[in-house]
């Protein structure tokens, strides 16, 4: 008798979300590097209004895109759940990039937990 596949679903879902969380962490690491390159070339951090346009369109002193525009149609930089990454300057020298998790809302636990560049920095 074939196994009932519905029994395996609950166990597979957490692994899928773990993979999406890991992908978001890797994306945030790459996005953070792009922001640092922008800062080095422009001598300032991007503003919230620069985000995410400069990533796929370049900037004043660096007209080439920081990310491949063909991989980001319409200039949208989306997390693994299809939500836009959130960028905010926390000071003239610091910033945060965040995925709002599976639910697309601030806060949450488990699959809905936010993934932040700030948390990644603290772990290093």
Image (spheres, grey):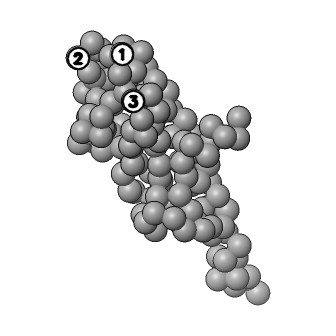
Q: Nearer the viewer, residue 71 or 94?
A: 94
Nearer the N terminus, badge 1 or badge 3? 1
For the question of whether residue 94 can be seen, the reply is yes
Name the residue rendered at 70%, 41% in the picture.
123
Q: Is residue 100 above or below residue 22?
A: below
The residue that disc 2 covers is: 60
Which residue is at a point 39% across and 43% down the rendered structure image?
Answer: 87
The alpha-carbon separation of the residues under discs 2 and 1 comes to: 11 Å
The residue under label 1 is 43
- Image position of 108 with respect to 37: above or below: below
Say whether marks 2 and 1 touch (CB < 8 Å).
Answer: no
Secondary structure of the residue carrying numbered label 1: loop
Q: Which image quarter: residue 74?
A: top left
Q: Residue 12 at what x, y percent from top left? A: 67, 69
- Image quadrant holding the N terminus, namely bottom right
114 relative to 7 in the view: left or right: left
Residue found farthest to the right: 1
Between discs 2 and 1, the one toward the N terminus: 1
Apparent side of residue 79 relative to residue 116 in the rendered image (left or right): left
Residue 92, label in figure: 3
For the residues labelled 2 and 3, the Cα–Cα distance comes to 19 Å
């Amino acid at each position: 008798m074939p196994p009932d596949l519905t029994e395996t679903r609950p166990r597979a879902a957490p692994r899928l979300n773990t993979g999406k969380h890991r992908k978001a962490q890797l994306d945030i690491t790459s996005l953070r590097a792009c922001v640092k390159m922008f800062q080095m070339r422009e001598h300032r951090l991007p503003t919230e209004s620069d985000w995410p346009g400069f990533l796929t369109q370049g900037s004043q002193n660096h007209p080439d895109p920081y990310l491949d525009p063909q991989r980001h149609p319409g200039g949208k930089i989306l997390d693994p759940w299809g939500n836009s990454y959130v960028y905010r300057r926390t000071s003239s020298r610091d910033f945060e990039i965040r995925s709002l998790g599976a639910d697309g809302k601030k806060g949450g636990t488990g699959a809905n937990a936010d993934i932040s560049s700030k948390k990644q920095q603290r772990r290093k």
